Image (cartoon, rainbow, N blue to C red):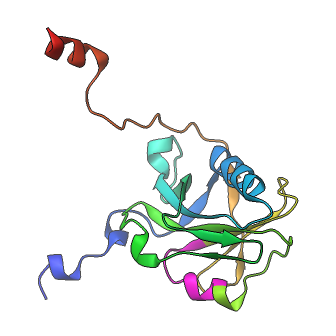
């Protein structure tokens, strides 16, 4: 098999997830509370720790994205994995349990194969109402990190560029 045929995303980022940015955790907690009494489901994205000023190899969860096409109700969140972006920065998933139970269900475990870490957030959605799990559904520690997140640059042009084009 050629080099491109054997490529995996883990070649471009450390497979170790070091923690979650405080801002990303706050977003997940708020999104879960805002969705209550229905479940919330999202995708976790990470950045290389060194780009965030940490002197360690690994990945920090920096973003929580809404899973496209998600249908939710008070006892489940259903999505089609084919709708999830094929994102090199994806590190796992996050979803809420409005009943407050911080254990994965059998249905949750079936979705844990995509990514390294999966977070369950439970009602009442406070700072301690969440738990991270590995792909086997075993609880894992995930540090909350106070890191400065880079501003997202969605476009590679500025207002000055637009003004020049309009002249």
Is 102 placed above or below 22 here? below
Q: In x, y percent, where is residue 60? A: 54, 55
Q: Quadrant of residue 17?
A: bottom right
Is 165 on the left-hand or right-hand side of 102? Answer: left
Q: In x, y percent, where is residue 53? A: 51, 40
Q: Quadrant of residue 158?
A: top left
Residue toward you, 42 or 35: 35
Is 112 part of what is drawn in magenta?
yes
Is 163 placed above or below 82 here? above
What is the span of residues highlighted in magenta in the rendered image?
108-117
**Residue at 15% of width from left, 16% of height from top?**
165
Is 20 part of what is drawn in magenta?
no
Q: Quadrant of the C terminus?
A: top left
Residue toward you, 154 or 143: 154
Residue furthest to the top: 167
Is 5 placed above or below 54 here? below
**Residue at 30% of width from left, 17% of height from top?**
159
**Residue at 60% of width from left, 70% of height from top?**
71
Q: In x, y percent, where is residue 99? A: 86, 72
**Residue at 13% of width from left, 89% of height from top?**
1
Q: In x, y percent, where is residue 83? A: 41, 70
Is 117 on the left-hand or right-hand side of 138? Answer: left
Q: How many marks?
A: 0
Is 19 on the left-hand or right-hand side of 54? Answer: right
């Amino acid at each position: 098999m050629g080099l491109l045929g054997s490529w995996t995303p883990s070649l471009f980022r450390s497979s170790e997830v070091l923690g979650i940015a405080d801002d990303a955790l706050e977003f997940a907690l708020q999104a879960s509370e805002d969705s209550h009494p229905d479940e919330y489901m999202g995708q976790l994205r990470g950045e290389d720790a060194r780009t965030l000023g940490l002197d360690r190899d690994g990945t920090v969860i920096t973003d929580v994205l809404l899973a496209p096409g998600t249908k939710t109700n008070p006892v489940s969140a259903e999505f089609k994995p084919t709708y999830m972006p094929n994102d090199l920065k994806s590190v796992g998933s996050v979803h809420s349990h409005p009943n407050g139970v911080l254990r994965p269900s059998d249905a949750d475990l079936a979705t844990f194969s995509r990514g390294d870490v999966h977070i369950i957030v439970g009602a009442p959605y406070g700072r301690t109402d969440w738990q991270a799990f590995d792909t086997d559904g075993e609880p894992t520690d995930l540090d909350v990190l106070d890191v400065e997140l880079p501003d997202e640059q969605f476009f590679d042009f500025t207002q000055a560029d637009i003004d020049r084009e309009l002249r």
